[in-house]
Image (spheres, helix red, strand yellow):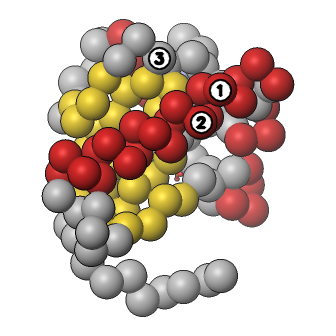
Amino acid sequence: MEDCIFCKIIKGEIPSNKVYEDEEILAFHDINPATPIHILVVPKKHIESLVHLEKEDEVLVGKIYGVINKIAEEQGFKDEGFRVIVNCGENGGQEVMHLHFHILAGKRLGEKIV
Ligand code: AMP
Ligand code: ZN
């Protein structure tokens, strides 16, 4: 947790370009955007990945999707559409071991895997 880059962003020890914040959730622009709009939504609680979610976190995950919806509306890409991705574990390509939801928007995404 001490070495977790997203925990450091949450604590304000590393700067970020914030989009949304409440008591439980923070959203900020990805430092290396894959699309014209690339926002990360993270729980402030350090949860390593999707498989580390516990029963008590289910409400939090619901709130995260609510925040994603709010961001889509506020940032003006709700109607044109967007993609939400959660990379999990080694095969999922997860690099930062703090649960995060990628919001990709601002262009037509071609490489559909599913
Ligand atoms: P993942 O590969 O799903 O673990 O995604 C990690 C994401 O975090 C990548 O898209 C990185 O560009 C992004 N990232 C890493 N460090 C920072 C940072 N300091 N500020 C914003 N985004 C970051
Ligand atoms: Zn963390």
Residue 8 shows up from this direction: no
Q: Where is the C terminus found, in terms of image quarters?
A: bottom right
Q: Are marks 2 and 1 in contact (CB under 8 Å)?
A: yes
Q: Is 84 drawn above or below residue 57 in the view shown?
A: below
Q: In terms of secondary structure, where does tag 1 sit? A: helix
Q: Residues within 10 Å of mark 1 (few under 14, many from 20)?
A: few
Q: Label 3 amino acid? A: Glu
- Which residue is denoted by mark 3 in the rendering? 24
Q: How far across and down, in percent of the image, does residue 32 sit?
A: 29, 55
Q: Label 2 amino acid? A: Gly
Q: Residues within 10 Å of mark 2 (few under 14, many from 20)?
A: few
Q: In terms of secondary structure, where does tag 3 sit? A: loop
Residue 19 placement, left or right of 109: left
Give whichever of 5, 49 is nearer the camera: 49
Q: How far across and down, in percent of the image, does residue 58 sit?
A: 71, 30
Q: Residues within 10 Å of mark 3 (few under 14, many from 20)?
A: few
- Which residue is denoted by mark 1 in the rendering? 59
Q: Is mark 2 within 8 Å of ligand 2?
A: no
- Rounded to the nearest angstrom, the CA distance separating label 2 from label 1 is 5 Å
Could you say which quadrant of the image residue 21 lies in? top left
Q: Are marks 3 and 1 in contact (CB under 8 Å)?
A: no
- Which residue is denoted by mark 2 in the rendering? 62
First in sequence, mark 3 or 1: give its number: 3
Q: Is mark 3 within 8 Å of ligand 2?
A: no
Q: Is 59 drawn above or below residue 90 in the view shown?
A: above
Q: How far across and down, in percent of the image, does residue 91 sit?
A: 74, 62
Badge nearest the viewer, 3 or 1: 1
- Rounded to the nearest angstrom, the CA distance separating label 2 from label 3 is 12 Å
